[in-house]
Image: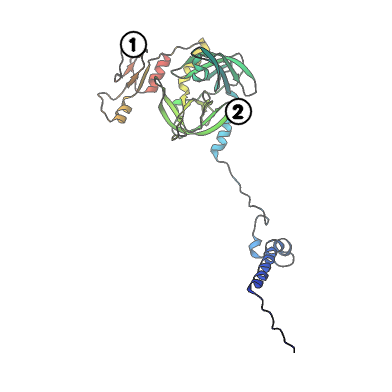
Amino acid sequence: MYFERPPRRRGVFSYFIVALIGAIIGGVISVYIAPNYLYGKIIPMPEIYQNREVPINQGQQINITPIDDITTVEAVAKKAMSFVVGITTVQVQREFFWAREVSGVGSGVIVDPNGYILTNSHVVADGDVKQINVLFENGDTLPGQVLWNDAALDLAIVKVEAMGLPTADLGNSDSLEVGQLAVAIGNPLGLDFQRTVTAGVISGLDRTIRTSQYSVLEGLIQTDASINRGNSGGPLLNSKGEVIGINTVKIGTQVGEGLGFAIPINVAKPIIKEVVEKGDFKAVYLGIAATEVERYEREWGVDLSIDKGIIIIEISPNTPADKAGLRPGDIITHIDNQELQSMNQLKKNSIQV
């Protein structure tokens, strides 16, 4: 007896496999074979490929045009780099019955071709250093000595035996405006990052910062150009490459960034001139923390009997102001018969006396 076996049905899975293989083959042809071997040679080029500016399978080129400020910063850096120096120090710290040597690092600005360098007083440990070395852009290193320093102003002048050094152009810090370009150059975090350039703007003027219990720096320039330990003593420059300030301190908190401060260069100008010409400078030190009467009235919401002058907030002990009998709350209206209106004016009069 003969039985004919019925035809076997193909399962759904078999159709799925065939479709998958066909899709893979079609994808290879459309993505690789057709664009590279068939289109334009055997079959017409599809419209989607006719207006492409770059070859198939290559990334599109992106052109970046630098903005003006980047060009300015580059020019300022090239101009200033030769008169910015690194300063390393060795200080002897005495603790109970022993002493140890502590190294320090900072920056400085050449302000006279005969080896006069402006920096911060705290960079040279307020003059209490065992050794100072000055590092120049060309790689030379020379020993230095502190000719003058003032911890209250946080300024110092270091001298090296050299002649014909590249010298900084000093700008006019009295003409600064908030928002102007500011470029800082220095050695943040040590000489491994020497002559680092950072840029920002003038964020504020006439700022007051307390650096210790009895030390207050006033009339400072605030900038958001990055300043770190080692930048101290280095220049803050304007768009012309002129030194407008000497970087001195930053506020290092977890909630505050971009808060760096510089001493206006106009404070240092008469000091530089006097030290270069006479070898020393004597500043008048009052020993007070004060502010303008107008600002005091605005901040505290009070109305004083006078609208101009400087009101004393705090007096350091054993200072000229303390010995003269001045007290907090006193208002200084004149110095040498000249009307006093601002802290900057007080500081200038004290330096120029």
In percent of the image, x 72 and y 86: which residue is there? Answer: 4
**Is label 2 or label 1 in front?**
2
Work out whether residue 45 can be spotted: no
* Label 1 residue SS: helix
Q: Residue furthest bottom?
A: 1
Q: Which label belongs to residue 323? A: 1
* Label 2 residue SS: helix
In percent of the image, x 59 and y 26: which residue is there? Answer: 191
Please provide percent x and percent y for residue 102.
55, 18
Name the quarter where the N terminus is drawn: bottom right
For the residue pair 246 and 6, the one nearer the viewer reads as 6
Residue identifier under label 2:
192
In percent of the image, x 55 and y 35: which residue is there? Answer: 72
The quadrant where residue 328 appears: top left
CA separation, marks 2 and 1? 47 Å
Please provide percent x and percent y for residue 286.
37, 15
**Badge 2 local density, few (<14 within 10 Å), some, or many (20+)?**
few
Residue kind at label 2, given as amino acid type: Asp
Residue kind at label 1, given as amino acid type: Lys
Name the quarter where the C terminus is drawn: top left
